[in-house]
Amino acid sequence: MKEQLKTIWKVFRMESSLVFHDSGVLLIFFVAAIVYPILYNFIYYNDVLEETPVAIIDQSGTAASRRYLRKVDATPYVSITDFCTDMDEATKLMKKRKVNGIILIPSNYNEKLIHHEQATISTYSDMSAFLYYKNIVMATNYVMLDEMDEIHLERYEMLGYSGEEAQQFINAVPYEENTLYNPASGFGAFLLPAILIVILHQTIFFGICMVGGTAREENRFNTLLSKEINSRGIIAVVFGKALVYLLIYAVLTAYGLGLIPYIFNMPHIGSYGEMLKLMLPFLLATIFFSLTFGTIIKRRESGLILFLFFSLILLFLSGFSWPESNISNFWRLVSYLFPSTFGIQGYIKINSAGALVSEIPRDYLGLWAQTGFYFLTACVAYRFSQIHGHKINAIKQKIHKVRAKTIANRFGIDEKELLDEGDYAPDEVNNTDNSETTDNTEKAD
Amino acid sequence: MSFWKNTKAVFQRELRQMFARPIYVFAPIIVMAFTFVFFLTFFQEGVPQELPIGVVDHDHSTMSRRVVREFNAIQAVHVNKNYSSYSEARQDLQDGKIYGFVEIPTDWYANVGGNKRPELTIYVNNAYLLGGTLSYRGMLTLGNLASGAYERIVLRMKGVQEDQLMGLLQPIIIDAHQIGNVYTNYGIYLLNLLIPGVLQLLILLTTAFAIGYELKSKSSKKWLETANGSMIAAMVGKLLPYSFLFVILGIGSNVILYDFCGYPINGHEYNMMLNMILFVFSSQCMGIFAIGLFPILRESIFFCSFYGILAFSLAGFTFPVEYMHPVWSGLANLFPLRHFFLFYSKEAVFATGFAGWWPQVIGMLAFGFFPIAIYKRLENALIKQNYPLK
């Protein structure tokens, strides 16, 4: 037990010195994880889309159509910026992106209303971004409902019903609506919680991959484990490494999920205690996950180059945007492989919706299951590279012995003397030797 | 003529290197293929349907049961569960199991019949903006339909004639046209920009890596010697193989989207090819700029990742740039993906042709100034190799 603790402490010291002496890793941990949350909050600071510019073609030109348009303009959703005489003119504005929508009131609008027929209003929306369309639909529909109520009342009055009796016709089944957890339907309040978790997940992943890749690049035997750790307990090694990242990310998580939402007034109705309970397995699972994959990475930059695009995939897989219920079974199973899925879901539920950890067993237990699973895979992966390392070690030693023998034979020196001197540790490797080994690995790629 | 000779020499050297470590040729192809397979299968449905909702029925009448049936008859939503209490439903809402629920009050049926206009209450979880909005729309449709159905029954009983009915029920209708995406298909909306977004990440990283690796392995002098000391020949020769690779990948993506998947394009596909070629060029220029600004491989890779990921937000296809702070809408012009998006929206959505998108052509060509800005710095780095290796 004491031996184990010693190993953990030793690995901890070695790994933290690797991390803190590597400016590439520091950039990822301390610049990306600190600057990204601030940048994204500034980008989505005005997260509610208001006053989308629209062009109007009022072919009716009557009091009724003007009343409709006045109300449309008064909604927060759109703002009438241009009055056009025909479709050509309005389309030109739309093509120049000066307006994002067109509302057309036909010449028979008033006539139809007078004759108690159905009048049609046409809208044309720019679909290059969905939010334009949403705003135009909201504005025209809300005003339509409001106008309909008035027209309804007038018509029922003509039929001889008025007051409450007419209301009973028009609105027999009224409803009240409650928008929970993001009442303004803000885009930032919806996107940012997921982004924050992905930032943590990906910076841990790329940071650990970089440390692993560097170790492989620099270590003489191209192994992750330097010679001295090789013989000791693998579990202690994995623990020691994980501890470094856990401590660093305890601070960064407190910053990213505690301080940032508070400063920028993002949704933060969850309790810090519950968040802590969720984040512990999330960080552990992510760290063990990254340690496992870090053993495959051969060069320090490869992680970023090959998997940067995966940040997007993780975001969609989590089901925060495209609804989880509509993700195919195959992709849902794939999504369970990544700690980010349960992390994002759990964080949204606790932070935005105020849930308790006990109320979200799937995400919470899912993260612990991943922690256990990836801990095992990390141990196996390290054991594997250790054996691999020993093999190479043995081969190298054999070569060394043969070389020593030939030299000894040729120059008549005692063989044992040479072997004692030749006890090589990685740091003894000179530069030319090093470049040779990297060249070899390159070809091996 | 010596320029072309030099360029050719570097070009051949680069081809040899590319095939010596084929992972840097295959990685972009594999990443693009995976991205396509992922997003095409992921958004297969187009519009999310049958979103799970709940009903809290305090009424237990024939009419309240009918509400559940009617919900299941429309495409947008599906009633997953009947809850006996509000708190149960709220907990499932919080847990993301349902995106919304309707609470039907006690004696609802009796009160509707008695003209007391009892209220239904709709709850929606908008922390999931898409699921929340769509299920809300579904529940709202039903609310309005229920009102209309009741009204129609009563009016018929009162003897109002059929042709007058619709005018009475709905005096105004809105005929909505969605230009560029008739079915409001989520895949069409996102894939048109996500694919070039991923391509842009690959271009930035590969460009910075191709040059940065020469610095890292201290072979940059040899590289310049191959080009007879001409920086331009060295750059063009080195990056041209990648230009071909990425243009093929980009145009291939367009062909897959517009020809195989039948994504709508109102303009001409050849113009979108031009857009793609300009986009590859401008992204490569930014890659050169990154390695020139930070002539250390790790720092330029870091810069490219940072910049490339920000491009997704600042292109403005999810949240429009013009609603962000003016600083951001200004900075957005420094991202090739932004220009690509504007070109796409003008050509593919509105079919404006050259008259519409010429500013984007100039914008993307202007990225050519970025490598010129760091020309001296990069040349020094290549010759002196005086930056740390790691």
Image (spheres, helix red, strand yellow):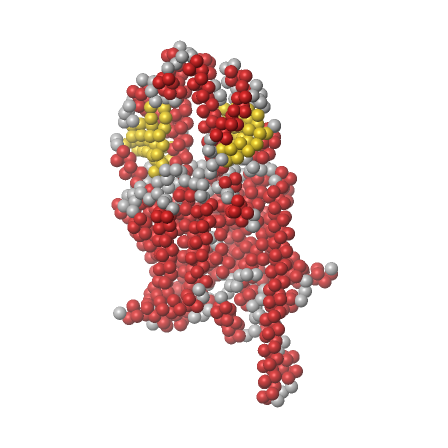
Q: Residue B215 is drawn in which quadrant?
A: bottom left
- Report if residue A65 is visible in the image: yes
Residue drawn where x is 49% and y is 55% of the image: A307
> Residue A393 placed where, x, y %?
61, 72
Instruction: Name the residue at 57% across, 70% down.
Output: A221
Whether residue B270 sits left or right of residue A143 in the image: it is left
- Quadrant the N terminus of chain B occupies: bottom left
Kindly give the residue lying farthest to the top in the view shown: A160
Total marks placed: 0
Residue A36, horizontal then vertical, whole percent: 49, 49
Residue A290 % position (x, y): 57, 55
- Indicate the quadrant where residue B304 lies: bottom left
Against B133, is A224 above or below? Answer: below
Q: Nearer the viewer, residue B135 or A257?
A: B135
Q: Say left or right for A85 vs A242.
A: left
- Tell me if residue A33 comes above or below residue B169 in the rendering: below
Residue at x-position 28% and y-position 43%? B352
In this view, the residue in front, A343 or A51, is A343
Tell me what residue is drawn at x 36 percent, y 72 percent.
Answer: B226
- At which x and y percent is residue A362? 61, 42
Q: Is residue A276 visible?
A: no
Horizontally, residue A298 falls left or right of residue B367, namely: right
Closer-to-camera residue (A412/B285):
A412
In terms of image quadrants, where is residue A160? top left
